Amino acid sequence: MNPTSILGRYLTKQLLGAFLGVLLMIIGIIFMFDMIELLRRTAERPDVEFSFILKMAFSKLPRTFELVFPFVMMIAAMITFWKISRSNEFVIIRAAGVSIWGVLIPILSAVFVVGMINITVINPISSYLYEVYETMDYRFKTRNPNAVLFSNKGLWIREATDEGNVLVLEAKSVRQEDDVLVLRTVSLLELDENSFLVKRAEAYAAELRNDEIEMKDVKIFETGKPTVKVNNYDYKTTLTVERIKENFIDPEAISFWNLPDTIEFYEKSGFSVVRHKMRYLSLWASPFLLMAMVLVAAVFALRGSTRGGGVMFLIVGGITTGFVVYFLSQIIYAFGINNYIPIMLAVWAPALIITMISSTLLLHLDGN
């Protein structure tokens, strides 16, 4: 069936209407529980304002929704199929000579478009908001007004010293070699407790090893003193390679459009990019996973008879199957991150397996 035909537009409208309804309901529930959890966490923090909590809950919402997005689409498809089955519209459509696939093609087309809009338009917005949430959460936990940032723009990091001063380290490029972090075009700023600049050191190269930053070819600028040039300059620090890696921006906080450049940067820097590659490929696979979930819904809910409450029983079975499928796909995803199986297999296997099994069952139903 042509998705732009009258019947195709009708089915698409039914699906999108159900999708928006389920979406708003689930977003409301997620937001409510996030607010309750954040209020519980901040109960003993009088310094945290309600506006801060509200902003945290709002910025976390897109990321949480992304996790349940396949369920929202599957439930919306369930509702759509149940409605056309209950009203006997599906029986009339089949009597007019339209196959099950004729019914599904407009719906699958709409789902694919929604999936592409999600990764190309909505994902950059949700990634930005999730980065905002990570920054706010980091500040909340550490009571530090500045979060650690590490991206393809280089390295910016802030550290408090024992003397009450603040150390700010900037590097234009970063590369890991074994247990040493090699920095290029480095600036090291030492600020006092009032954020006034006390000392600045600039170097062409530096290495972070153990508890020291070893700078080479250094110019030292200090208030009220002439510029000093030295070959080597060491600075005590509590920073480690592991600490910096732990504070990387999560792949979920990087938009679909920026992931390729970020992957390239981390590869050149010598860091592992498995999580970033998994994230990028999973975004490409997400529209196909959505369509696979719709096929699961069709197997259970697209029936020609509603006698004996059979459709409701099948819908419950379909939702249960959807949960099982989703959790199995997450297990496979975890195997891919830990390099137990190839990345491509971990990303594409769930969608392909679900599609093949569901298609086989639908072909069987269409032949009966």
Image (cartoon, rainbow, N blue to C red):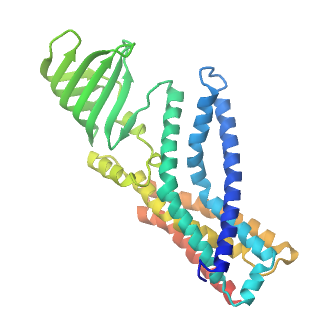
Examine the rendering and report whether any part of residue 195 can be seen: yes
Q: Position of residue 303 (x, y in %)?
A: 75, 79
Position of 114 relative to 160 (above/below): below
Image x and y of residue 94, in percent: 72, 86
Q: Residue at x 50, y 38 (%)?
A: 132
Image location (x, y in percent) of residue 80: 72, 69
Q: In this rendering, would 236 be left or right of 29? A: left
Q: What is the quadrant of the C terminus in the image?
A: bottom right
Task: Identify which residue is drawn at 12% across, 21% down.
Answer: 230
Q: Which residue corresponds to the image point at 45% horizontal and 58% vertical from the top-left?
A: 336
Image coordinates of residue 176 in percent, x first then y, are: 27, 41
16 vs 164, nearest the viewer: 16
| For residue 36, side relative to residue 239 (left or right) | right
74 or 329: nearer the viewer = 74
Residue sitting at x 66%, y 55%? 23
Between 12 and 275, the one lying in front of the other is 12
Quadrant in the rendering for residue 60: top right
